[in-house]
Image: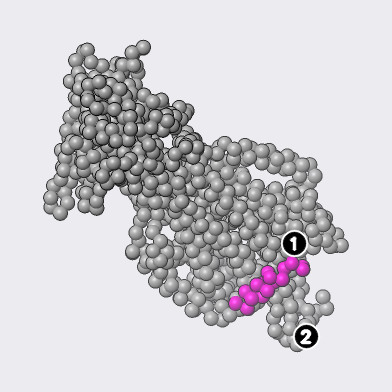
Amino acid sequence: MAYDCIERRLSRLFAMYGGFLSRHPLPFLVLPVLLAAGLGSGMFFMESDSSVEGLYTPDNGQGKTERAVVREHFPVNDSEDFQASRLVTLGRSASVIVTSKAKGNDGVLSLAVLSEVQSLYRGISGIEAQLSGTDHTFTDLCAMWQSQCVVDGYQLLNFALEKDENMTIGYPWTNLPDGTRLFSGATLGGVTLEPGTGHVSTAAAFKLTFYLRSENSEHDRLSEEWEKAFLSYMENFESDIIDVSRTSSQSLEEELSKLTARIVPRFSVTFTVLITFSVLSCMMLDTVRTKPWLGMLGVLSAGMAVVSSMGLCIYCGVKFTSVVASMPFLIVGIGVDDMFIMIAAWRKTHPGGSVEERMGETYAEAAVSITITTVTDGLAFGIGAITVFPAIRIFCIYTGVAVLFDYFFQVTFFGACMVYEGRREKSNRHAASCRPAVSPSEVADRSGYYRLFCTGNNMAGVNEEGEFSGSDHAIMTFFRDYFGPFITKTWVKVVVMLLFAGYLGCAIWGCLQAKEGIRLSNLAADDSYVVSYNNKDSQHFMSYGAKISVVFSNELEYWVASVQDQVENAVSRFEETDFTWGKNESESWLRDYLDFIDQFSGIIPGLNASSKSPFIINLRRYFLTNPRFKRYELDIEFNRNKSEILASRFLVQAKEINGSVREKDMVIKMRELANQSPFQTTVYHPSFIFYDQYIAILPNTLQNLGIATATMFVVALVLVPHPVCSIWVTLSIVSICTGVVGYMTFWDVNLDAISMINIIMCIGFSVDFSAHITYAFVSCKENSSNARAVFALYSLGMPILQGALSTILGVAALSTAPSYIFRTFFKTMFLVILLGALHGLVILPVVLTFVGRNVCGNKDSYSVDSKMPPCQKSFKTHQGQTGRSETQRKGGEVELANHQCNNGDPARLCTPIQYNNPSFEPDGT
């Protein structure tokens, strides 16, 4: 065809390479093994990165910019002036949530439970961490406020134990005997209030949070050791009265790092299953032509690609992450698929030909096919590597490199293995014993078992005239004689199109219901203590969550009444959203300062805020030195001589942020209000950095999908021999991707960093399924579109099934993995392969019968009921010559057409291969 010039030249180049490989197989066998061993040694230097922020938040997230602004104006001093509500980073901490084992009326507020909680507090406070031979207690390492260790919940615990019957616990604020108010909304969970009083009647959970110093590297190391000691203590803690869930600031990262060790044993299962599947798939009843060893070596070749890619990436400084642990499952499946294409191409060559000739034909047919696969998959992962999510980027780097290594080892190491197996077959030797095999006719008097297992004939299928028609697999016959004619019936095509319309409708609806982002607790294993803690936290403590900082970073004249009104109005807008509580739960130094002046202006001489000087002086002298308001020192940035206010901070209380949708919408709303503020305003909480993934994941996914789809359109335009068909390949990609995103929503999978990896892979696999089936359709020179559809299914039905099955087997072990990460990988990969195979085997052939009538034309007639498609015919040769048609060429050059269409890429039928062999004589055909 006019459009296959690139592919035809590649085919000839690979034919020459295959011949060269067959003459010199040893270097291609040994050198790849040495390369894999050398690169694989890099795994000894493996460094694992489990940083949740570093891996699962976007590089350019706005939260990181906001953090830099807040840190610049309000740095944290956790050794003297620490307030948990004013954290700039999550820092170091350890936390427990206590629930009662008894089903009493008071819940955790019963005296017995509170006493047990107090005992637990003392036990945790006494935990010692040892570093360099020195013991450090919590008191040595705790974050401090006014020389006291900061433990959220401790004051309320003491109050609850010491209060008399006239004192009550309020919610979310409790009035203490000294006149101060204590925020109980973050300490008590599952609260029931007495009607009309606001007093707590019962509470289901009690939270204690121990804050540690991390202001310098030494304190950070000590605090890390104390956290480990805390987790060890809590693991062994037992009580007959209370249940305790625990976590620490490093728990999630530690649990994430443990996942790899739990997944590795599953890879051995996958490796065994795929070896078994490959060996069985490569076996034949003929003990000479059977190739079980190649099945095993093909899986080994894919394993070498995994080892080489990991070693090379580690040598290049790319840190290993737990997500990369799913890469081997995928690569082994891809490698097995390539192996099947290579072996199928070999089997379609004439058994009487030389190994050199057969390898040339095999590479001309199969190498281009796996080159297309490698190009599409490599491009997909290359595009994925430009994402702003480091976890996705690292996975795509490792997997993209592994795809390239798999391709390299398939065309070198595995090709060399095929040469040696081909030589064994050529010499008519038994596949197991390598001894000369006898034909069944020569041992007709022996037992049936002997004839079955000990005989063979490498010339099976060659008739007396030297013709070789090949041996069609039963599945290929099924597609040609049954499935193809059935699916091309008019009423079946109508049903398929109606079902396809329903599929697209449900997929689009599912896309509209997709939720963005991954819950951090999902990163840990299902049975992790982190999951238990986060579940209780979500169940009991969502009413009052984060306190959001609203920072005005420009210099304002706070002493001017109009500016005060502007500030009040600006803060009120943040307080009056659906995501925040009102001013009663907020902390505004300006509001409390003005109330303080109104209250004490008649008592304290000169106390007023009428102008700049008294405003600043009284603020520093009287208001900020008052114990009730001293925390506001952390919210006002003065210049060096304390005469100017450079920036100030206000805190608003978030309300019922109980899911990713609320988290995303809350962040968007807060930033929208900040942009509308008359001042230079920044809103921030440390969690915003993680919430940024919800905002970034959808546009980043659409961007990558757009780039990848456009790239694959260009690839299809180059490789598919008709421009119109490139459009249908691209539309098929869009359909598959829509289905994956839509149906993964119905399978409880969010649009997050993990599923985004698979959506990127969806592009590459979609091209594999769609481009080849379309290529087969347009390559068959028949006037009937139904005939071309039958031929495409006959040529590619079995490889598509083999490839789909091998890939699903490769990731099947992840379906029962004890982690959302790996189960999501399986679910999305399963959808990618299933929908890709359905498009390739059902939807696309039917669509092409409608739209592909004029794509290619030939006046030959062909009925879909024919038992042999016109593109699949044997060629007559002289006795003793190879089974190909020969046509005399100038200078003795002979052009040989393949006797059979390629199982992986039928274009090989239309691709002539040049041989210089003057001994061939024309037979007049």
Picture quarter with the C terminus: bottom right
Picture quarter with the N terminus: bottom right
- Left or right of residue 783, residue 121 in this image: left
Could you say where residue 790 lies in the image, as x and y percent from the top left?
A: 75, 55
> According to the image, label 1 marks what residue?
722
Magenta range is: 1-17
Give the residue displayed 72% in from the left and 43% down from the top: 496
Which residue is at the front of the view, 250 or 53?
Answer: 53
Residue 43 shows which numbered tag? Answer: none
Could you say where residue 484 lies in the image, as x and y percent from the top left?
A: 73, 51
Could you say where residue 197 lies in the image, as x and y percent from the top left?
A: 33, 13
Q: Name above or below for residue 313 compared with residue 323.
A: below
Question: Disc 1, disc 2: CB below 8 Å?
Answer: no
> According to the image, label 2 marks what residue?
890
Give the residue displayed 50% in from the left and 43% down from the top: 695
At label 1, the amino acid type is: His
- Left or right of residue 497, residue 342 in this image: left
Q: Name above or below for residue 105 compared with residue 900.
A: above
**Residue 472 painted magenta:** no
Q: Nearer the viewer, mark 1 or mark 2?
A: 1
The kind of secondary structure element at disc 1 is loop
The kind of secondary structure element at disc 2 is helix
Secondary structure mostly seen in magenta is helix
Q: Earlier in the sequence, mark 1 or mark 2?
A: 1
